[in-house]
Image (spheres, rainbow, N blue to C red):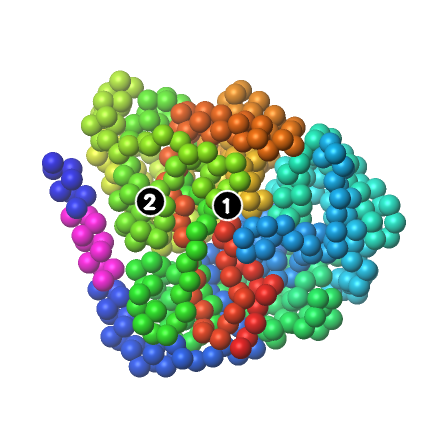
Amino acid sequence: MKRRTNWFAFIALVVMAVVLAACGGSDSGSNSANESGGKKAGKDLTIAVNQNFVTLDPQDSNNTLDNSVQQTMLEGLVGFDKDMKIIPKLAEDYKVNKDATEFTFMLRKDVTFHDGEAFNAEAVKTNFERVSDEKNGLKRYSLFSNIEKIDVVDDYTVKFTLKNSFASMINNFAHPAGALQSPKSLASGDDVARKPVGTGPYVFESWDSSDIIKVKKNDKYWNGDVAANSITFKPVVENGSRTAMLQTGEADFAYPIPTEQVETLKKQNITIENTDSIVMNYLSMNVSKEPFNDPKVREAITHAINKEDLIKVVYADYAKSATSVIAEKTQFYSKQEDQSYDVEKAKALMKEAGKESGFETTIWATNTTNYIKAMEFIQQSLAEINIKVKVEPMENGALADALWAVEDPKDAKVQMYFGGWSPSTGEADWGIRPLFSSDSFPPNSYNISYYSSKEVDKGLKEGLATSDEGERQKIYDDVQKTIWTDMPWVPISNPDNIFGKKSNLEGIVLLPDGGLSVTELQIK
C-alpha cells in the first residue's frame, strides 16, 4: 500500500509541474504566441529538433535524426511513403528473381548529382561497394553485407547478386542508408560526413559551430520545383525552448513536441499532429557483466518498472506499452505475454539472486528532456528493490562513441542504457538483428546488451533465407518469444510521433520510423 501511495505522489508532483509550466508559458507570452500561431511559413523554413547531429554520411549513420537531414539532400534507388510502403526514387522500376538472390534496378536517365556528376549505374555500384565492404568499417555495413557482387548491365541498369536468398532486401535498399552520394565526392577525400553531395531536392549549404545545418533549394532538381528556398535545422535539446520557438514564430516546424504542451499549442492556432510509430523505447542491460548476467536480476528489474506509469509521466499517455521487442506496426510483429508490474515478485527474485541488499549501477541516455525523465523514473523504480542508479545524460555524439565505438566487449563501460530504436526498413529483421544477434556486438552493429543466443541467431539466419512470408512470420514469432523470455531488455513503449507546424505547411510529415519527410512539402 505504501508503494502505491509513493507512486501516486510522484506522478501528482510531475503532473502539477507540467500544468504549472504550461500555464506559465501561456500567461507570459499569450499575445505573441497567439499572433505567431496565425503567422504563415515563408520560403525559408526553420525546423527545431531535439538532438545534436553526428554525421551526414548515410552509410555511417546510426540515428534517425541524422537520416532525416540526409534525406533532404540524398536519395536512394527506392524509398518509403508515409505508410512505409516501397516507392520508386532514383530507380524507375526493379525486378527480383524467383529465389530473391538477384535484384535488378532500371535507373532514371535525367538525374545529376549536385556537383554536376552524372547519376548512372557506375555511381550506384560505387556507393554500394563502399558500404558492403566490411573493411571500410561503416556502421550500416550489416544492412548490405549480403551483397556478393554488383554488375553494371548498361549505363542505366544495375544488378545486385546476393550471397543468400533475402526477399526483404528491397526494404534494405529503401532504408535511408541506401541514399547515394556523388562518386566524385567519395573519391575526393572531402569530408562527406560534413558535406554530402547527393541528387535530392536540397543542396548542402553549411554546418556551423553551433551545430545548425542549412540546406538550400536545388534549382536543377530532377523531380520538379522545390517548395522552400532553404531549410535550417536547429538542435534544441530542452523541450520548453523548442516549443517556445513555435510559439514565437522562430520555428516553422518542431519535433518532437512535449506531450504536456500539446493542448496549449493547439489553442494558439499551431497545428499539432500525432501518429503511431514503429519506434521502440527500451532499457537495455549489459548481460555480459555482473550482476546483469543473472537472469533473475534482469527479471526483477523488468517487474520493478511500471510501464503504464512511466508512459503517463514521460509521454502523458501519447505512447503504447511495448508488447514485444518490435512495435506492433512492424512487419512480422508478434505479441508477447504481459510482463506485469510486481514489486514484491521483483524483491523475491533479487533475494533468490543473492542481491536482496541491492547494488549500484549507472544508466546512460541522450540528454533530451524525455529521456532524462525516463531515466529518473527508472532510478526511482529500482530504488524500491534496493538498486541505486546513477543517472548520466550524455550529448549525442559522446554517447554514440561510448556505446558503438567499443572494439572489445570486455572494454564496454555501458551498464544500463535507455534509448530508442527505429527499424527503418519497416520489418522485423532490422528491428531485431542489429540489437540481438551475436554478430552485432559493437563496433559491427548495435547489440550493446552483448546478448547472445544460439536460438535467436539460428532464427535470424532462417528468417533471411526464405521468401515465404508465412514461414518468416513463424520464425520471427519464435525469435521474439525467446528474447522476451531471456529479458536482455525491458521493452518500455512505442511513443507517438508528435510534431507541430505552421498552418500553411502541408506534406511535411514524420514517417512511422520517426524520420522526417519533406518529399511532398507544400507552402500554401
Q: Which residue is mark 1?
A: 422
Q: Secondary structure at mark 1?
A: loop
For badge 2, the amino acid type reads Met
Q: Answer with the quarter of the image where residue 206 lies.
A: bottom right
Frontmost residue, 450 versus 106: 106
Q: Is residue 427 left or right of residue 379?
A: right
Residue plotted at (39% across, 76% down):
37
Residue plotted at (16% across, 40% down):
4
Q: Please state which of the two labelled residues, at mark 2 or mark 1, is closer to the viewer.
A: 1
Q: Does residue 508 show up magenta in the picture?
A: no
Q: What distance separates the C-alpha of mark 2 from that of mark 1? A: 19 Å
Does residue 172 lie above or below 107 as drawn? above
The N terminus is located in which quarter?
top left
Whether residue 522 is visible, yes or no, is yes
Q: Which residue is mark 2?
A: 375
Q: What type of secondary structure mainly makes up the magenta span?
A: helix
What range is drawn magenta here?
9-19
Residue plotted at (61% across, 25% down):
462
For badge 1, the amino acid type reads Ser
Whether residue 184 is visible, yes or no, is no
